[in-house]
Image: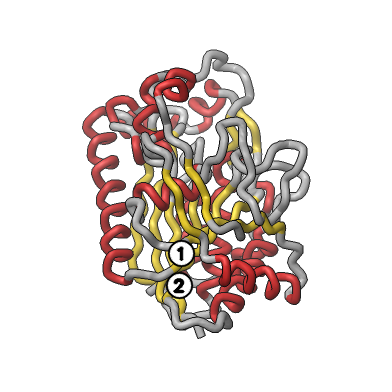
């Protein structure tokens, strides 16, 4: 049977690929629009500044602090790269949030999986660069895409096995036998592009991307359903009749676009200790905005709980860009 040799969960946010001196430096145009989600409530920029004034977050957005924390994040990513280099999995199964990259508003499955032979990630070419947001985002985009078209192979035999096991376990998994087209053409998607570009560095290793609808109501999976899906995934991979080594990845998170260190710490600990009651009992309403990506960590936890692998490497760095608490919690966790 297949050997699940590694599990890992990692943040994939744009701050990772953006130099700290050009991290977001301006608040939104409207300081009174309720743009930010924080602990299940919506706030304006001005309200967030007032709400978090006692934390004195201004001290954490100096150029010196941002550079220091950016370096820490890069080290945690480099450490994860080194772990993958050492383990050398034959297949990487990845869950990540889909943000209208594979699926549009006309169709948005809760759980999906690529089962096509290959996936194309179209280049970030000059016309696309011109159409992007302000220039400071271009470095970040390059951690999701290359400047040439790139093709990745899919482990279709395992994908077919997972599809059958999911059906038997009561999961109606959408199987993509062809790669969907997005408004950008055929793309891998940021959650998976990050893993391939930054962590696996475009190595020739077959993958199985599994897009999760973490963000778009009404059919987002609850934390409990994510854990159950992960458990099914771990069992399915473990029963695959192959001698290949498999890694399981949860891509996304942690808290953003408001960085919430307390929330991150609780979720990190629940994932690391396989606190099933804690994870399954999390209030789904708290997974608004970018927080929703942490559901991929919960899936990874459920999957790795089906193995003998234990939490090993851990890293967490809160990164702030504005005194209102705008930023992201950057985390990495492995099971080895």
Contact check, label 2 and label 1, Cβ < 8 Å = yes
Q: Dot 2: within a 10 Å radius of its alpha carbon, few (fewer than 14), some, or many (20 or more) residues?
A: many
Most distant residue in the top direction: 29
Q: Left or right: where does residue 65 sit relative to residue 172?
A: left
Q: Left or right: where does residue 60 sit relative to residue 255?
A: left
Above/below status of 270 relative to 62: below
Can residue 15 be seen by looking at this rendering?
Answer: no
> Which labelled disc corresponds to residue 102?
none
Helix, strand, or loop for circle 2? strand
Count up the numbered dots: 2
Helix, strand, or loop for circle 1? strand
Query: At which x and y percent is residue 25?
Result: 38, 22
Q: Residue at x 60, y 71 (%)?
A: 233
Q: CA distance from mark 2 to mark 1?
A: 6 Å
Query: At which x and y percent is residue 175?
Result: 68, 58
Most distant residue in the front direction: 117
Question: Which of the 4 image quarters holds residue 210?
Answer: bottom right
Q: Earlier in the sequence, mark 2 or mark 1?
A: 1
Most distant residue in the bottom direction: 1
Would you name the residue on which mark 1 appears? Answer: 92
In this view of the protein, which residue sits in the foreground, 156 or 166?
156
Query: At which x and y percent is residue 72?
Result: 26, 47
Q: Residue at x 48, y 33 (%)?
A: 52
Would you name the residue on which mark 2 appears? Answer: 246
Q: Residue at x 31, y 47 (%)?
A: 73
Q: How is the image coloured?
A: secondary structure
Quadrant that contains the C terminus: bottom left
Above/below status of 305 relative to 76: below
Question: Which of the 4 image quarters holds residue 283?
Answer: bottom right
Query: At which x and y percent is residue 159?
Result: 60, 67
């Amino acid at each position: 049977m297949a050997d699940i040799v590694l599990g890992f969960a990692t943040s994939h946010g744009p701050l990772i690929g953006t130099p700290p001196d050009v991290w977001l430096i301006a608040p939104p145009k409207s300081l009174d629009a309720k743009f930010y989600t924080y602990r299940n409530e919506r706030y304006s920029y001005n309200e967030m500044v007032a709400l978090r004034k006692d934390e004195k977050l201004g001290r954490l957005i100096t150029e010196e602090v941002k550079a220091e924390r950016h370096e820490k994040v890069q080290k945690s990513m480099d450490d994860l790269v080194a772990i993958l280099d050492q383990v050398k999995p034959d297949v990487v199964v990845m869950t990540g949030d889909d943000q209208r990259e594979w699926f549009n508003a006309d169709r948005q499955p809760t759980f999906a999986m690529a089962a096509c032979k290959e996936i194309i990630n179209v280049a970030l070419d000059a016309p696309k660069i011109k159409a992007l947001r302000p220039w400071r985002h271009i470095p970040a985009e390059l951690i999701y895409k290359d400047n040439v078209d790139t093709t990745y192979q899919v482990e279709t035999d395992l994908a077919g096995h997972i599809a059958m096991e999911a059906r038997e376990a009561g999961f109606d998994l959408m199987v993509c036998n062809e790669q969907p087209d997005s408004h950008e053409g055929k793309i891998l998607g940021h959650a998976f592009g990050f893993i391939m570009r930054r962590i696996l560095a475009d190595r020739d290793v077959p993958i199985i991307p599994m897009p999760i609808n973490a963000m778009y109501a009404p059919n987002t999976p609850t934390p409990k359903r994510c854990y159950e899906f992960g458990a099914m995934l771990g069992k399915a991979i473990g029963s695959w009749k192959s001698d290949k080594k498999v890694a399981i990845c949860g891509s996304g998170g942690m808290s953003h676009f408001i960085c919430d260190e307390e929330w991150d710490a609780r979720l990190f600990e629940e994932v690391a200790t396989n606190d099933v009651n804690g994870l399954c009992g999390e209030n789904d309403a708290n997974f608004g905005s970018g927080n929703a990506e942490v559901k991929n960590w919960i899936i990874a936890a459920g999957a790795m709980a089906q193995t003998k692998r234990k939490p090993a490497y851990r890293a967490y760095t809160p990164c702030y860009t504005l005194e209102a608490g705008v930023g992201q919690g950057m985390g990495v966790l492995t099971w080895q």
